[in-house]
Amino acid sequence: MIVLFTDFGLTGPYVGQMKSVLYQRAPATTVIDLMHDAPTCNPQASAYLLASLVGEFPIGSIFVGVVDPGVGSQRSPLIARINQRWFVGPDNGLFDIVAQHALPDSEMKWWEITWQPERLSSSFHGRDLFAPVAAMLANGEAPPGRLHDRPEDRLRRWPADLEKIIYIDHFGNAITGVRAKNLDKDQIIAVGDQSFHWARTFSDVPAGQGFWYENSNGLVELAVNQGRASEVLGLDIGDTVSLFA
């Protein structure tokens, strides 16, 4: 399957145009819309979010990740093979956290895409470059690119956990880039002058109370029972999260 992860949004033609390319070039392949509201023009926040989601998809899945504020610039187009899954998109750190969190003994390879389509818009590589390359992989073709000599260099770009809010979901909950498995349940999490204690789930605290918990994808999430944390507490993407014993 091909899995789409972008910041395009669902309005406008962009997702539809990408899926049209995939259908024409790999019509037998299932295409999954994982999300199209990744943090806009924010590869770092998107990298931690993507890393928390890939484990739900089967071996062999092909992720097309497009959060690409540098589109049309000198940044390279990339293919990565991590934990037996493929990743296609810009070389701007978007796949680095997936690689950092990979199994210790997993094989990892990176290619710079060298294939050029007949038409390459300066502002829409998702449609013109990344979607066709993903279709090639889905059809069993070899990666159309040049292997990187030192792929481990890219694993040092960002920390393994990001102590910031990386996403506000549909319910107003604030997802952080911190993996909950690395915290004790008695730790206090603060954003500005607001502090949050751990709870297992929403119903374990009174209505209107804020708390932190391990969300379904393993990340620390800040929430308000029966309320929108982003509005009630004024939380937003990029806010720094502090951890206290």
Image (spheres, grey):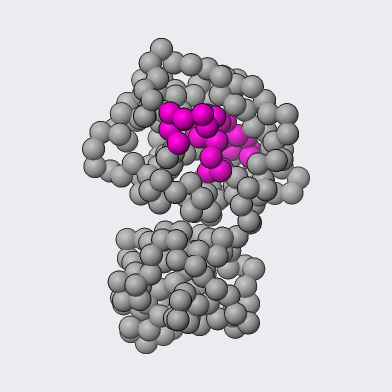
Q: Is residue 217 above or below residue 83?
A: below
Is 111 one of the magenta-colored residues? no
Report which quarter residue 20 is drawn in: top left
Can residue 144 be seen here?
Answer: yes
Q: Position of residue 182 (x, y in %)?
A: 64, 68
Q: Quadrant for the C terminus, please.
A: bottom right
Along the viewing direction, whichever of 62 and 178 lies nearer the viewer: 178
Along the viewing direction, whichever of 202 and 40 lies nearer the viewer: 40
In the picture as drawn, the residue positioned furthest to the bottom comes out as 206
Q: Position of residue 100 (x, y in %)?
A: 65, 49
Name the residue located 40 percent from the left edge and 73 percent from the top edge: 223
- Horizontally, residue 193 falls left or right of residue 14, namely right
What count of labels does the image hold?
0
In the picture as drawn, the residue positioned furthest to the front comes out as 74
- Horizontally, residue 41 falls left or right of residue 11, namely right
Q: Is residue 189 above or below residue 9?
A: below
Q: Is residue 58 above or below residue 240?
A: above
Q: Is residue 159 above or below residue 59?
A: below
Q: Position of residue 235 (x, y in %)?
A: 38, 69
In the picture as drawn, the residue positioned furthest to the right comes out as 105
In the picture as drawn, the residue positioned furthest to the left comes out as 12
Name the residue located 42 percent from the left edge and 40 percent from the top edge: 69
Can residue 62 be seen here?
Answer: no
Q: Magenta span covers which residues?
A: 70-95
Name the residue located 48 percent from the left edge and 46 percent from the top edge: 43
Along the viewing direction, whichever of 91 and 57 lies nearer the viewer: 91
Name the residue located 74 percent from the left edge and 49 percent from the top edge: 104
Report which quarter residue 29 is drawn in: top left
